[in-house]
Image (spheres, rainbow, N blue to C red):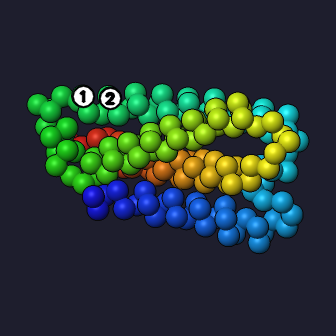
């Protein structure tokens, strides 16, 4: 459970960025998505949802490859004994969950956003999920680079 603590911290940081920092830094309507024309906002939801769904597929494939590595190989055994491999798997799983939530919220935004009714809370939650999933994705890439370096430097 301690390994999942970073996910909560990332979500809190993302929420603070959207709900506290953004209104201070950007005067006017917040979240920033609200400022878009309704048609542009729906198009933005579509584009971001396409990207998050693509990242989701990429991460699911990466996790499947990582967990199916041949444990009989010494390098794989050494990697699985170290902390970075398990952190990588946990981080990628957390990123998958957040990307799934962002994708679902984006689809809901495309379907439900009529531009006539205020949906600032929904848009702020969507922005929080988006920011959190992008931070998790970047952190996953960092852990992947660490594991890849360990494999490359293995003698």
Q: Is residue 63 above or below residue 6?
A: above
Query: Going by the image, does 134 lie left or right of 150?
Result: right
Looking at the image, residue 79 lies above or below residue 26:
above
SS assignment at label 1: loop
Label 1 neighbour load within 10 Å: few <14, some 14-19, many 20+: few
Tell me the residue at 44%/42% (across/down).
97
Q: Residue 46 appears at what percent x and percent y?
A: 71, 31
Look at the picture and state if 117 lies above or below 2: above
Distance from Cα at disc 1 to Cα at disc 2: 6 Å
Where residue 125 appears, x then y in whole percent? 62, 52
Residue 147 makes an appearance in the image = no
Q: Quadrant of residue 8?
A: bottom left
Q: Residues within 10 Å of mark 2 (few under 14, many from 20)?
A: few
Across and down, in percent, residue 1 comes to 27, 58
- Please say if the residues under marks 1 and 2 sit with CB atoms less than 8 Å apart: yes
Which residue is farthest left? 72
Q: Nearer the viewer, residue 73 or 152?
A: 73
- The residue sitting at 20% across, 44% down in the picture is 80
Query: Residue 151 got which mark?
Result: none
Report the residue at 76% width, 67% height from top: 23
Could you tell me which quadrant the C terminus lies in? top left
**To which residue does mark 2 refer?**
64
Q: Is residue 110 left or right of residue 62?
A: right
Element marked by disc 2 = helix
User: Horizontal placement of 99 versus 122: left or right?
Assistant: left
The structure residue drawn at horizontal position 24% and vertical position 28%, both measured from the top left corner, is 68
Residue 126 located left or right of residue 97: right
Residue at image mark 1: 68
16 or 117: which is nearer to us? Answer: 117
Q: Position of residue 112 (x, y in %)?
A: 72, 35
Whether residue 84 is visible: yes
Q: Quadrant of residue 73?
A: top left
């Amino acid at each position: 459970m301690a390994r999942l603590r970073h996910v909560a911290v990332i979500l809190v940081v993302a929420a603070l960025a959207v709900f506290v920092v953004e209104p201070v830094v950007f005067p006017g309507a917040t979240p920033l998505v609200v400022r878009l024309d309704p048609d542009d906002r729906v198009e933005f939801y579509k584009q971001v949802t396409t990207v998050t769904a693509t990242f989701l597929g990429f991460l699911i494939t990466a996790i499947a490859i990582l967990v199916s590595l041949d444990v009989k190989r010494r390098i794989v055994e050494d990697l699985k004994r170290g902390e970075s491999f398990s952190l990588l798997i946990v981080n990628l799983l957390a990123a998958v969950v957040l990307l799934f939530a962002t994708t679902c919220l984006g689809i809901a935004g495309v379907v439900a956003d009529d531009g006539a009714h205020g949906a600032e809370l929904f848009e702020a939650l969507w922005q929080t999920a988006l920011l959190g999933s992008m931070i998790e994705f970047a952190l996953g890439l960092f852990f992947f680079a660490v594991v890849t370096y360990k494999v490359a430097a293995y003698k």
